Every structure is written in structure tokens, then in C-alpha cells.
Image (cartoon, helix red, strand yellow):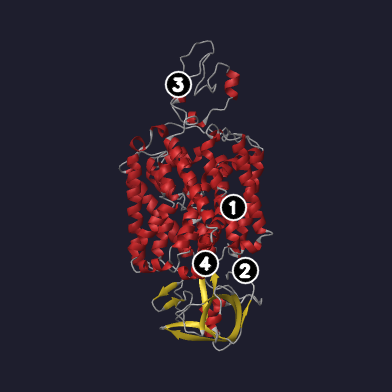
């Protein structure tokens, strides 16, 4: 009888029936556990298996940092709220509250709809089907991956787990990078939100999706020259991962209602995982909107490259959801060059602080550094070109 | 772990109730946040949240959430921050200080961003105007600013908020409202000048109704819309302070 695995959880015990009924922690699914542990007859004495520290028991450094940042944010928000009750701060708090709530009330429904779509995809679209499309023609796969967001409408927060799964299934590195960058831009929900934010001025929609596609394909092909699965991915993603959610997604025979329920559960989890990024981003955006004088931007209007750099920096810092960022960009309409607003809408879904942190869960550091440099440079040059040849999009 | 699951259910219930209330009984509050053409989004979100709530009520805590509950609490509490700030949003207003930040100023004064200064040369970046509504409380301030030639010399009535600036002549004050394109985050001030003999006696940030002939005046080489009036009436805030 094995004494227990992963801190005495009982997984891998000798009782076969009990073993089947015991849920496997998701962390073990992705660890070396399945590579080293082979079920054996119960009578044979096995050496005590001691896997790597279980993140369920001992939080990783990134989780501790995230906890600290979230705690700090909550503290600041509460302090500001109570400080704002004083007459001196009352006006600013009122203005910030309206702006903050307005962004949330507008953006959160899009995030919820996106989560719902993601949950349905998770349960109803077999990854094997996608995999078959990619393996046969590697170069064509990059161009196909750029448009895959049209069928997988996920925002940037949800795309990293999907890409990890695709990489685990053997999708080529360059195609995965392309999908990672293009998916959150080239999709129907983002197109709809951009259209609404710009009052159905379709030029903005087509330019945003077109530039997102073109830049993602270029970067996928370019980085594919230097990196591949062997030197670009973390070791854990070179092997086939197994979902740890406890659902049987592959069974088409499952009752439709049960699968719908699983889809809703996944979607609900996305709301809890991603919603906080949206709220923090919206609060920072509202704070900026309530404190920065628009006349500051007036001087930048005459310096397009500076305006583009500023909006790219804002996209990096604000961490807004790609399904909602168009509304923030549209609020600068008439104040900033169109290319600068487009830089905000194209860069944000590809690169922001939360995304960079999430990339560390899939790629090696050198890939992430290359990604940051390549995406930043390409978006900047593309937007300068846009401003030169098409200064007005409306 | 039970507490974490209850917390999640509580958050979903709070957001469902909030969105449901906004789209039904709280439309006056929703009108301060969101353009009416987008209210359907809030309705759709209410339905999605209801579905999430229904499945979560009958759900075991996901495996991924087990074992490190204390790490999840701040992330979950962040989801309640907007509901806390709604308390202050209800009483908050975009006032003259907001106007000073959101309106573009030059050394010679405010530039009315929404004025169409040249025929057919709309450089404001605004979408086309919605058709005017026929209610008495909905005075077409946007139209006065953007199509001043259509109202030249005609009697008009406006409902707006006052802004008295020391840089203006003694018989002139500004009257403004905020124009929403999508939500209050993108609200930009639209204003007209009011020529009134006792302009200096006007209180700042008050809702008024004024009636008089419309004209355009030149101020520091900028053409601005204005009305001339002999009577200014202080009124309560309209149900929908923004214009769309």
C-alpha cells in the first residue's frame, strides 16, 4: 500500500475502486506524475512517491505576488473610497465613480458573453479537430491560425489556456504564437464591440481586425525562424496535458443538458478568473480619465509618433479586455490621431502586464523577451505607416 | 472551502441583482452611465449571470480552487469593488471641474469641441446626431452647437448646467451638458454661451432653463453659439442629465 501521494491525499492508493473515484488534482495532471507513476498491483510494495511540491499546498511565487498585488489594490481602493468622503476629495471621487461604473457596466457584459462562448467552445469543440487542421500544412497553418479567432471567440485572458492546450496537442510553435496574438482581436465579439464603440463606423473595425491579423501572422512567421517547440516552450508543455477540471469533455454521448451545464461552469470560472483584471484595469483607466487634463493630449496630437507611443504604453498598463478596450479608445476620438487609437486597440490584446505574466506559464524567458520586442516594434511601425498613408479612418 | 463557494455565489447573486435592478427599476441610474442604445447589453449580462448563479448553486467547488482558499479572497473581493463605488456614483456628478478637464482650452478660452466650424467640415470625430426628441425637457443642445446655422435668429429654449468663468464678460456665462457616445467615460461637454444682464449673479453648477433668440458670437476668433435671454429659471436636475 502506498502511503500517499502529494502530501497524503490518498491518490494512488492500493484500493483500485477508490482510486477511480478519487479526483486527480489538476496540478498532478500537468506534472511529471503521470510519467513516473505506473499503477501496480496492490500487493507489491512500492517506493514512496514524492512528487514536486504541490502548488495546491505550497503556493508558487507568482501566486504570492498576485495575492500581494490584489491585496494592495484593495487597500488603495478602500482608502481612496473613504478619503473621498471628505469634501476636498468628494468631487474627484464622484467623477471617478461614475467613470469607473460606466466602463464596468459597458465592458462586463461583453466579458460575460465572451466567457459563455469560451465555455461552449471548451465543451463542444473537440481540440482534435483543430489539431488535424494544423498538422498537415505548417506554413498554411500560420495563416489559418490568424483567423481562428473567428471560430474561437475568446478574449486575451482566456486564450493562454487554449494555446497551452493546443501546444500540448502538437500544434506548431509559430501557428500557436499567431493564434495567441490574433485570436483576441480577429473575432466576432471584438468586431461587434469595436463597431458599437465607434458607432458602426466599419473602417475602424476592418482596420483593427486586418492589422491584428497581419501583425500576428508576421510575428508568427518571424519568431518561427528562431524558435520551435524544443527551444521555446517550458518542459511541461512538450508533453500531452490532461484537463484537471473533472469533466468528461470528449464524450459526445453525454446528455446535452449536462454538457451545457459543464460549459456554464467553465464560463463561470472564467468570470471569476478574468473579471478582476477587467475591474483593476477599469479603475486605473477611470482614475486616469478623472485626473488627466485632456489638454495634455492636445500637445501630442501634433506629434503622431509620441501619441502612438503614449497609447501603446496605456494599452500595456491598463490591461483592458479586448472585448471592451474599444470603448476606452473611442473616448479619445477627436483628441488623438486614429493611428494612436488603433495602436491601443491592436497592442493591448497582444501584450499587457497580465498577459506577460501569463506567458510565463507557457514560454521560456527568451521567447517572451523576443515577443515583447517584436510585437512592440511591429505595432509601432505599422501604426506609423497607417498614420502616414491613412491619417483619417472616418 | 465552503466559505469560498458561498462567497462566489454571493458575488454572482449581487451582480445579478445589480444588473437586473439597473435594467428594470434603476433606469435613471443606468442613464447616467450608459447610452440607451446599449441597455440591451445589461439585460443580456443579467441573463448570463443568472445562468452562472444557477449552476453554481448546485456545484461542488472546482478542484483548482481547493487547497489555497486564502489566496483567492482578494481576487474575489475585487469583484465587489464596483458595487462599493456605485454608492458614490449615485451622488457623483460631472461638474465644472470636470468641464475644465474634459474641454479643450486655448489661451483665449474654451474651444467648443463639438462645434461644426465649417460647412461640411466635421472634424469633431462625433457620430451623426440622433433625431431630435419632441419632449420639452430634451432641448437639442447638440444641434445648437453643431448646426448653429439652422437656428440663427430663432427662439430656442435650453436646459443645461451653469458655468461662470471670471474670464468672460460680465453679461456672459456658459451653459453645458455632457454628450455620451457610448458611456459616461467618453462624455464630452457641449455648451453654449448665455448672454444675460445679471450673469455675475448666476450660481455655478446649477441646472437652469433659459429661453431666447439664438445667435453666433465671435470670441477671440472662435465662433460660439449663444442665446440672449432676460430670464433664467433654476430647475431640478432632469432625469437624464446627459444628452445622447
Query: Marks 1 and 4: which is nearer the front?
Result: 1
Query: Marks 2 and 1: which is nearer the front?
Result: 1
The disc numbered 1 marks a residue on which chain?
Answer: B
Residue pushed farthest right?
B25
Query: Marks 2 and 3: which is nearer the front?
Result: 2
Query: Marks 1 and 3: which is nearer the front?
Result: 1
Dot 4 crowding, Cα within 10 Å, few <14, some 14–19, many 20+: many
- The image shows residue B152 at horizontal and vertical percentages of 54, 87
Above or below B168: residue B9 = above
Determine contact: label 3, label 4, CB under 8 Å. Answer: no
Residue at which label 1 appears: B83
Where disc 4 sits, the SS reads loop
The disc numbered 3 marks a residue on which chain?
Answer: A
- The image shows residue B12 at horizontal and vertical percentages of 62, 46
Check chain identity for marks 1 and 3: say if they share one. no
Quadrant the C terminus of chain B occupies: bottom right
Mark 1 or 4 closer to N-term? 1
Mark 2 or 4 closer to N-term? 4
Amino acid at each position: 500500500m502506498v502511503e500517499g501521494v502529494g502530501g497524503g491525499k490518498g491518490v494512488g492508493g492500493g484500493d483500485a475502486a477508490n482510486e477511480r473515484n478519487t479526483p486527480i488534482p489538476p496540478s498532478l495532471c500537468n506534472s511529471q506524475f503521470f510519467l513516473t507513476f505506473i499503477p501496480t498491483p496492490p500487493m507489491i510494495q512500492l517506493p514512496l512517491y514524492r512528487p514536486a511540491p504541490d502548488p495546491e499546498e505550497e503556493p508558487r511565487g507568482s501566486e504570492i505576488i498576485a495575492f500581494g498585488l490584489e491585496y494592495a489594490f484593495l487597500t488603495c481602493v478602500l482608502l481612496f473610497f473613504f478619503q473621498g468622503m471628505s469634501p476636498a476629495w468628494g468631487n474627484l471621487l464622484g467623477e471617478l465613480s461614475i467613470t469607473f461604473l460606466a466602463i464596468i457596466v459597458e465592458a462586463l457584459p461583453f466579458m460575460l458573453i465572451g466567457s459563455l462562448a469560451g465555455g461552449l467552445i471548451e465543451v463542444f469543440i473537440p481540440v482534435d479537430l483543430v489539431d488535424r487542421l494544423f498538422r498537415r500544412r505548417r506554413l498554411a497553418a500560420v495563416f489559418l491560425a490568424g483567423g481562428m479567432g473567428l471560430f474561437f471567440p475568446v478574449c486575451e485572458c482566456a486564450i493562454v489556456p487554449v494555446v497551452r492546450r493546443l501546444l500540448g496537442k502538437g500544434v506548431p510553435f509559430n501557428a500557436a504564437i499567431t493564434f495567441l496574438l490574433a485570436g483576441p482581436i480577429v473575432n466576432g465579439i471584438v468586431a461587434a464591440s469595436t463597431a458599437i464603440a465607434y458607432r458602426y463606423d466599419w473602417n475602424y473595425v476592418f482596420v483593427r481586425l486586418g492589422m491584428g491579423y497581419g501583425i500576428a501572422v508576421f510575428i508568427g512567421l518571424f519568431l518561427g525562424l528562431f524558435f520551435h517547440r524544443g527551444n521555446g516552450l517550458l518542459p511541461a508543455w512538450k508533453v500531452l496535458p490532461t484537463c484537471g477540471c473533472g469533466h468528461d469533455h470528449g464524450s459526445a454521448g453525454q446528455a446535452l443538458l449536462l454538457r451545457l451545464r459543464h460549459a456554464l461552469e467553465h464560463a463561470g470560472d472564467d468570470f471569476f478568473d478574468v473579471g478582476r483584471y477587467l475591474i483593476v484595469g477599469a479603475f486605473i483607466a477611470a482614475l486616469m480619465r478623472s485626473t488627466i487634463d485632456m489638454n495634455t493630449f492636445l500637445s501630442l496630437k501634433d506629434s503622431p509618433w509620441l501619441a502612438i507611443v503614449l497609447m501603446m504604453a496605456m494599452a500595456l498598463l491598463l490591461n483592458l479586455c479586448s472585448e471592451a478596450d474599444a470603448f476606452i479608445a473611442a473616448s479619445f476620438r477627436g483628441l488623438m490621431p486614429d493611428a494612436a487609437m488603433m495602436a491601443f486597440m491592436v497592442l493591448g490584446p497582444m501584450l499587457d502586464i497580465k498577459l506577460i505574466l501569463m506567458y510565463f506559464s507557457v514560454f521560456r524567458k527568451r521567447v517572451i523577451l523576443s515577443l515583447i520586442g517584436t510585437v512592440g516594434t511591429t505595432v509601432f511601425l505599422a501604426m506609423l505607416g497607417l498614420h502616414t498613408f491613412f491619417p483619417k479612418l472616418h | 472551502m465552503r466559505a469560498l463557494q458561498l462567497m462566489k455565489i454571493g458575488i454572482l447573486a449581487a451582480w445579478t441583482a445589480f444588473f437586473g435592478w439597473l435594467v428594470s427599476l434603476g433606469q435613471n441610474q443606468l442613464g447616467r452611465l450608459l447610452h440607451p442604445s446599449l441597455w440591451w447589453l445589461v439585460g443580456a449580462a443579467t441573463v448570463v449571470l443568472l445562468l452562472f448563479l444557477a449552476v453554481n448553486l448546485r456545484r461542488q467547488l472546482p478542484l483548482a480552487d481547493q487547497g489555497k482558499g486564502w489566496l483567492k479572497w482578494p481576487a474575489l473581493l475585487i469583484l465587489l469593488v464596483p458595487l462599493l463605488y456605485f454608492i458614490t456614483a449615485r451622488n457623483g456628478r460631472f461638474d465644472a471641474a470636470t468641464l475644465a478637464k474634459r474641454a479643450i482650452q486655448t489661451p483665449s478660452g474654451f474651444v467648443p469641441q463639438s462645434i461644426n466650424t465649417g460647412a461640411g467640415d466635421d472634424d469633431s470625430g462625433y457620430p451623426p446626431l440622433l433625431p431630435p426628441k419632441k419632449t420639452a425637457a430634451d432641448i437639442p443642445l447638440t444641434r445648437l452647437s453643431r448646426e448653429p446655422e439652422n437656428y440663427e435668429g430663432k427662439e430656442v429654449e435650453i436646459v443645461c448646467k451653469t458655468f461662470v468663468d471670471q474670464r468672460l464678460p460680465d453679461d456672459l456665462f456658459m451653459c453645458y451638458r455632457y454628450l455620451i457616445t457610448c458611456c459616461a467615460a467618453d462624455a464630452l461637454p457641449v455648451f453654449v454661451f448665455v448672454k444675460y444682464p445679471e450673469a455675475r449673479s448666476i450660481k455655478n453648477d446649477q441646472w437652469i432653463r433659459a429661453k431666447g433668440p439664438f445667435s453666433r458670437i465671435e470670441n477671440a476668433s472662435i465662433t460660439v453659439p449663444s442665446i440672449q435671454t432676460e430670464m433664467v429659471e433654476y430647475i431640478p436636475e432632469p432625469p437624464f442629465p446627459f444628452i445622447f
